[in-house]
């Protein structure tokens, strides 16, 4: 019975996620696939907002945005294991979770009240830079996505 319930929750999450892959983006935030699916079922609107926030954290670029702080992608560390991303990391925005890595603690929190954008070199990716929006820009983009869905 429990497995059937979990399967049902995963189906709900998958249907909400569609091409956005919200479950993959938010699983590190909630701690497990089971908790992610449960939250999605119980709080669909909040889940949708969290998904918009996770999707808003990054974008890829061919140039370093003006005023951005340039860092190596190897400075990004997994929050649980502490492992650094490899220099040949290939960006996939549908699965790269803002919550799985130290983007907030290691970078944004250093300039919480500033409008600071970080840019990470990703030479193996289609676009050579992964841009981490400032907290202000990330929240504004998330609200825009949420309101337009």
Image (cartoon, rainbow, N blue to C red):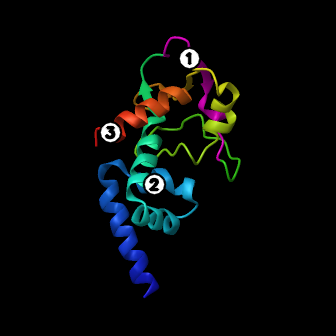
The foreground one among 42 and 32 is 42
Tell me whether circle 1 and circle 2 mark residues in contact (CB < 8 Å). no
The residue singled out by tag 2 in the image is 24
Other-residue count near label 3 (Cα within 10 Å), few / some / many at <14 / 14–19 / ≥20: few
Other-residue count near label 2 (Cα within 10 Å), few / some / many at <14 / 14–19 / ≥20: many
- Disc 2/disc 3 C-alpha distance (Å): 22 Å
Residue 137 within the magenta-colored segment of the rendering:
no
The residue singled out by tag 1 in the image is 68
Residue 40 point in image, percent of width and height: 42, 61
Other-residue count near label 1 (Cα within 10 Å), few / some / many at <14 / 14–19 / ≥20: some
- Disc 3/disc 1 C-alpha distance (Å): 27 Å
Which secondary structure lies at badge 2?
helix
Q: Which residue is drawn at the image coordinates 39% and 68% (left, top)?
A: 10
Task: Tell me the quarter of the image containing the N terminus.
Answer: bottom left
Q: Is residue 21 left or right of residue 114?
A: left
What residue span does the magenta drawing correspond to?
64-78
The first of marks 1 and 2 along the sequence is 2
Q: Is residue 74 left or right of residue 27?
A: right
Work out whether 23 lies above or below 145.
below
Q: Which residue is drawn at the image coordinates 28% and 43% (left, top)?
A: 149
Q: Where is residue 75, by image quadrant?
A: top right
Residue 78 point in image, percent of width and height: 64, 47
Q: Is residue 113 left or right of residue 38?
A: right
The residue singled out by tag 3 in the image is 147
Q: Which residue is drawn at the image coordinates 46% and 41% (left, top)?
A: 53
């Amino acid at each position: 019975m429990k497995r059937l319930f979990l399967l049902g929750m995963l189906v709900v999450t998958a249907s909400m996620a569609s091409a956005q892959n919200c479950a993959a983006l938010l699983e590190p935030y909630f701690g497990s696939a089971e908790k992610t699916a449960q939250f999605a079922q119980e709080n669909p609107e909040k889940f949708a907002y969290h998904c918009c926030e996770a999707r808003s954290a990054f974008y890829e670029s061919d140039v370093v945005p003006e005023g951005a702080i340039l860092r190596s992608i190897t400075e990004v560390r997994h929050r649980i294991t502490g492992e650094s991303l490899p220099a040949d990391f290939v960006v996939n925005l549908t699965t790269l979770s803002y919550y799985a890595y130290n983007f907030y603690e290691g970078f944004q929190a250093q300039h919480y009240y500033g409008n600071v954008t970080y840019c990470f070199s990703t030479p193996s990716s289609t676009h050579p830079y992964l841009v981490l929006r400032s907290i202000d820009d990330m929240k504004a983009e998330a609200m825009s996505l949420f309101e337009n869905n």
